[in-house]
Image (tube, rainbow, N blue to C red):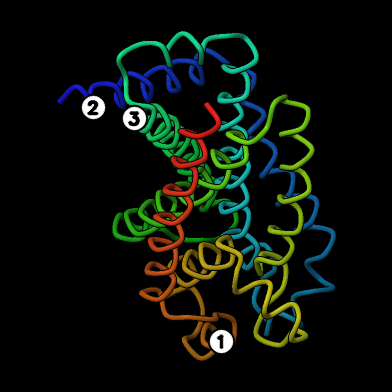
Amino acid sequence: MHFFKSIFAIWQREIIRYWRDKTRIVSSFFQPIMFLLIFGAGLSTTLTAGNFGVDFIKFMYPGIIAMNVMGIAFFSTVSTVWDREFGFLKEILVAPVSRTSIALGKAFGATTIASLQALILLVIAPFIGVGLHILVVVKLFLFMLLLSFAISGIGLLISSLMKTTETFGLVMQVLVFPMFFLSGAFFPLTNVPLWMTIISRANPLTYGVDAMRQIILNGQISQQVINKLVLYPITINGIFLIGFSIIMILAAVLAFNKRS
């Protein structure tokens, strides 16, 4: 029971810290909207034909949601580095609290923040011609949780190894853009070079984008077109994200225990 109380306490601290930073909340909401407006309006005519005639904004929308999940989950785990720099981590490490519970509390906090923030993006769906009903929202939120948990594991693993926030930010930038552009958010991965296929298959964001695209576009366009755009069945995407999340969280917990 004490173990779970410790997880909850760390999780609650992460949520409170996030809620008090209103600038962060607003900026993380408007950034994906700018991506949709700028890339959607600027590239729609050029890339719609390459996406088998699917409206580019609708095609990109699941990728923008996944990008939002990834960015917030990564950014949320930087609190581990802050806590180490400002001494808070030392204070809780000398307390009779399991280090594993601290790591899990931070991972769950980042997962919650990223998922809820991405869920807000669904309010713009009607404005881009995407119809959503309650079952679709539930499915999307499930994959938001899976994807954010996987990314939180990566972020926590990196933050456990970094000494400064500057170093963490540099490593995060090196990872974020390749992961995003090789996830299928902007173009289908069904007909790309072999090297890109290999990298994309190791990218957790690929599976999140692929699943969310199927969930959102199902019923919006014909099944034949969907089959040309997607990579794997939704079940396979879910299994991969679950397995990847478990591996990353275990690695992050081990690194956190050794480093901290």
Q: Which mark is residue 3?
A: 2
Element on which disc 2 rests: helix
Along the polypeptide, which appears first: circle 2 or circle 1?
2
Q: Position of residue 206 (x, y in %)?
A: 58, 67
Q: CA distance from mark 2 to mark 1?
A: 49 Å
Q: Is residue 197 left or right of residue 257?
A: right
Pointer 3 residue: 101
* Amino acid type, mark 2: Phe
**CB contact under 8 Å: marks 2 and 3:** yes
Q: Position of residue 8 (x, y in %)?
A: 29, 24
Residue 218 occupies quadrant:
bottom left
Along the polypeptide, which appears first: circle 3 or circle 1?
3
| In the image, residue 18 above or below residue 70 | above
**CB contact under 8 Å: marks 3 and 1:** no
Q: CA distance from mark 3 to mark 1?
A: 45 Å
Q: Is residue 235 visible?
A: yes
Element on which disc 1 rests: helix
Q: Is residue 168 left or right of residue 98?
A: right
Pointer 1 residue: 225
Q: Which mark is residue 154?
A: none
* Amino acid type, mark 3: Ser
Q: CA distance from mark 2 to mark 3?
A: 6 Å
